[in-house]
Image (cartoon, helix red, strand yellow):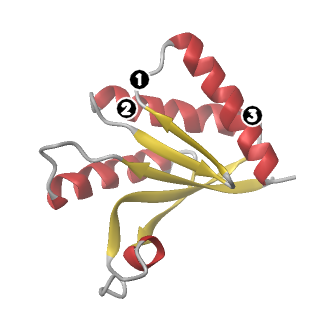
Amino acid sequence: MSRVRVRIDVTTLADDDEFVLGEVTDELADDLRDVGEVDRVERADVDPDAKGVAELALGVVTVLVGTDPGYVQAFVDVVLAFLRRHDGRRVHLRVGDIELTIDRPTSRQTDELISTVRAAIERAHP
């Protein structure tokens, strides 16, 4: 089965501190393990000036997700369920050179989102 890596950045809220953002990121990572192989991103991969060698970047995970339509659907479902539980929060997805920001889409927008993510995954993995 073909797979592609998707990067997911969780946006911060005004009252977030490092602990809250770390907890929310861990929750998303746990959810995503149902659809693919999840890695936390090290801060050096996000900020080249970061001092901590193995320090994790808060709010950033990657998931290696299958390119099969069922896996794409499951991936989008997991992300949307996470957003429903965390009102006001957004996620920023990066698949190859395509980037999307998602908050609380309507059902019509969800269908478009699935199509967009599927197209981005297909484009990133020819």
Camera-side mark, 1 or 2? 1
Badge 1 or badge 2: first in the primary sequence: 2
Amino acid type for the residue under numbered disc 3: Pro
What residue is pinned by disc 1? 104
Is residue 55 depicted above or below 87 in this figure?
below
**Circle number at residue 86:** none
Amino acid type for the residue under numbered disc 2: Leu
Residue at the location (65% across, 28% down)? 114
Residue at the location (37% across, 32% down)? 83
What residue is pinned by disc 2? 83
Residue at the location (45% across, 29% down)? 80
Q: Nearer the viewer, residue 89 or 99?
A: 99
Cα separation, mark 2 vs mark 3, equals 21 Å
Which of the 4 quarters of the picture holds residue 59? bottom left
**Circle number at residue 69:** 3
Is residue 61 depicted above or below 49 in this figure?
above
For label 1, the SS is loop
